[in-house]
Amino acid sequence: MEGIVFVIFHSLMKELKRHSLFHRIKWRKFILAAAFFVATGALLQTCIVSYPPMSNWFLLPPLTLTPSSYNIFEKTSYNISSNTTSHIKGNLPMATFEHFPPLTSLHSLNSTTMLPPSAPVVEVRAKQKSRRQRRNTTRLAPSEPMIVPQRPRVVTPWQRHVWSLRPDEALVYARKEIDNSSPILANDPDLYAPVFRNVSLFRRSYELMESILKVYIYPDGRRPIFHTPQLMGIYASEGWFMKLMEENRQFVTRDPARAHLFYLPYSARQLQHALYVPNSHNIKPLSIFLRNYVKMLAAKYPFWNRTRGTDHFLVACHDWGPYTLTQHAELTKNTIKALCNADVSEGIFVAQKDVSLPETTIRRPRKPLRNIGGKRVSQRPILAFFAGNMHGRVRPKLLQYWRDKDEDMKIYGPLPNRISRKMSYIEHMKSSRFCLCPMGYEVNSPRIIEAIYYECVPVIIADNFVLPLNEVLDWSTFSVVVAEKDIPNLKKILTAIPLRRYLSMQTNVKMVQKHFLWNPRPVKYDLFHMILHSIWFSRLNQIQIQQG
């Protein structure tokens, strides 16, 4: 044995001397000692494996078990792995280590290979965990797994009754329930009653919508016009509604026989991008395209012809939305249209049947709620503010009377650079008491919802405009509507509002804000649900007319 150690050590030293590192004096002793221990360790490992008698010098004697010794595990935590090595946790009494005759064979759980009878059982110690790891680790016995009970879904007899109704029967039932709804005695913590026309009626209608409504989305239509939401810009409302509707699991059904409403999932903005020829001033090809699409649905499915399209709806925020429907009479007359361009003077948008869609400006789709909020009234020195491009009949008139005419009235065209460097457009809205929202080419304006976002009381200047969500919200409590002919008297109208009333209006703007927010994941009473409720409510009004 000593000769073998000498041979290994001599070979290592001969190899080390070939390298320059060995000749450095400060490393020589360290290298010599390391080489000696490596050689000795390698020799000992070889001898232990090659000569079983030597294992008795370094290892415990082989451990074998008899039936009489099994009871030692009753109070010991143990675990047998699927490999051939057994890991035993716990200290066994020394009295149980008896030398019984060796077992003839030892089988692993995953193999039938037989080990030599004299092979010892080597105890392997698990790596000790730190005190912090032991403290944060939950100790569970293998026979006691943690089971988290799931809360069972409770289905009430009322829900069973409603779900058993046919779609038309369910709508009639919902209409009667709303008509017979009783007033709410206490304030709803989620609804601020002063901003609603009838908060009791709205709440009951909303509850019925959550329990009953099912929407079928037609899978037909090629991208990008269909099923491709645009989530940024001033026309983002149609895209956000499409996105959240198609992702929804509560209201969407794949069975059209269960549906109360049918959604035509196209984007007016994408339709304009795909089909309109720039500078042609001709949108008839867009109307023909939609006409052919509806004819295809009527030929492929029975649902359109069953009601002539009265239980179908579309959502379009582009200014051209109403004009792209004119080539199909039933699409224009019967379908529920959620439109930003809600102008009753043109004969396409029908009040109390169609839905005025809020026009929202989304600058960052990943953060749609960015910059939401405003300043206190005491930090709003500007009486009224407007800045924007000059188009339509109202804005040039506004500038004619008020640009550079009064220090309290900050009225601009496009915000000048010398002004925007000191205070941005958003900061102007957050620093103003009233935000002017004049119409452009069409009656709708994204400034209305922007004003609500920045907690500035909106002043709406657009004749014949049906305000968004007008069927449930009382706009007189949080906005000012000024006729176009009264633009010269604008400051007089605003300063005539008492401070107490203004403070109430500004508070109402804050409270109604939640109903105009796009959330990446829809929240109860947010804009997605409010638009869907308006469509649902419109359908129920049709049921009431048909039953009458």
Image (tube, rainbow, N blue to C red):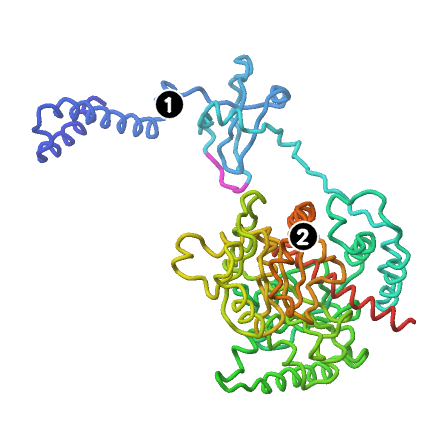
Label 1: how many residues lie within 10 Å, few (<14), some (14-19) or many (20+)? Answer: some
Label 2: how many residues lie within 10 Å, few (<14), some (14-19) or many (20+)? Answer: few
Please identify the quadrant where the C terminus is shown.
bottom right
Q: Position of residue 342 (x, y in %)?
A: 67, 71
**From what the image shows, is residue 517 above or below residue 165?**
above
Q: Which residue is disc 2 drawn over?
A: 497
- The mark nearer the N terminus, 1 or 2, is 1
- Tell me which residue sits at (51%, 30%) in the image: 86
Closer-to-camera residue (378/404):
404
Closer-to-camera residue (250/264):
264
The residue at the far top in this view is 95
Closer-to-camera residue (320/311):
320
Which tag is nearer the camera, tag 1 or tag 2?
A: 2
Amino acid beneath label 1: Ser
Amino acid beneath label 2: Ile
Q: Position of residue 76 (x, y in %)?
A: 59, 21
Looking at the rendering, the stretch of residues picked out in magenta corresponds to 110-115
**From what the image shows, is residue 92 above or below residue 325?**
above
Q: Position of residue 266 (x, y in %)?
A: 62, 74
